[in-house]
């Protein structure tokens, strides 16, 4: 990711996160509609899950310019089982579509490219952390 893309992701996440409950509801509704089998990974009440969602992706956003620090959704965020590449892809794609929905009037190609690069980085980082474990 370029520095400009990282800046775009940080700024857009901050704006999307101004309404964390709305972001969480849109995210989980879309995720469970697309991949109902993932519901088993998210058993806590929505109020707690909202905080976890914001913390989890906030953590990735803060670490995105530190490629030597792989993180794992399983190791760092307490998922009970390993997430496969397809599951990680579904989660990150859902995040991208949720942020796009919230920021729709301002969403453009540069934001799209930045979020695609960010989501790809999450998947690479998570898989690298799992391989290192």
Image (spheres, helix red, strand yellow):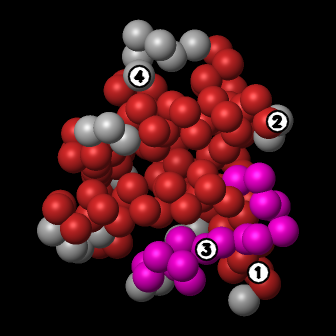
Q: Mark 2 points at which residue?
A: 2
Q: Name the residue under label 3.
A: 72
Q: Residue at x 35, y 26 (%)?
A: 102
Residue located farthest toward the bottom when viewing the structure as drawn: 133
Q: Which residue is drawn at 22% across and 68% down?
A: 48
In the rendered image, residue 112, in percent from the top left (x then y), is placed at 61, 24
Q: Verify CB contact (< 8 Å) between mark 3 and mark 1.
A: no
- Above or below: residue 107 compared with residue 32: above
Q: Verify CB contact (< 8 Å) between mark 3 and mark 4.
A: no
Q: Can residue 26 be seen in this view?
A: no
Q: How busy is the neighbourhood of tag 4: few (under 14 within 10 Å), some, or many (20 plus)?
A: some
Q: State which tag comes first along the sequence, 3 or 1.
A: 3
Q: Which residue is drawn at 72% across and 32% down?
A: 5
In the rendered image, residue 133, in percent from the top left (x then y), is placed at 72, 89
In the rendered image, residue 122, in percent from the top left (x then y), is placed at 65, 56
Residue 82, quarter of picture? bottom right
Q: Verify CB contact (< 8 Å) between mark 4 and mark 2.
A: no
Which mark, by number, is residue 106? Answer: none
Q: How far apart are marks 3 and 1 (CA)?
A: 10 Å
Q: How far apart are marks 4 and 2 (CA)?
A: 21 Å
Magenta residues span 64-79
Of tags 3 and 1, which is closer to the observer?
3
Q: How busy is the neighbourhood of tag 1: few (under 14 within 10 Å), some, or many (20 plus)?
A: few
Q: Mark 1 points at which residue?
A: 131
* Towards the viewer: 26 or 48: 48
Q: Verify CB contact (< 8 Å) between mark 2 and mark 3.
A: no
Does residue 66 belong to the magenta stretch?
A: yes
Q: How far apart are marks 1 and 4 (CA)?
A: 35 Å
- Above or below: residue 3 compared with residue 44: above
Per the image, label 1 sits on a secondary structure element best described as: helix
Residue 72, quarter of picture? bottom right
């Amino acid at each position: 990711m370029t520095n400009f893309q990282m800046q775009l992701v940080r700024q857009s996440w901050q704006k999307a996160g101004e309404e964390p409950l709305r972001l969480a509801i849109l995210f989980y509704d879309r995720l469970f509609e697309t991949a109902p089998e993932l519901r088993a990974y998210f058993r806590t009440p929505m109020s707690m899950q909202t905080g976890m969602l914001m913390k989890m992706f906030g953590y990735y956003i803060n670490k995105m310019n530190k490629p030597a620090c792989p993180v794992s959704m399983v190791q760092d965020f307490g998922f009970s089982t390993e997430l496969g590449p397809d599951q990680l892809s579904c989660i990150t794609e859902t995040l991208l579509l949720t942020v796009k929905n919230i920021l729709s009037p301002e969403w453009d190609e540069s934001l799209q490219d930045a979020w695609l690069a960010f989501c790809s980085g999450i998947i690479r980082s998570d898989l690298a952390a799992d391989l290192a474990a």
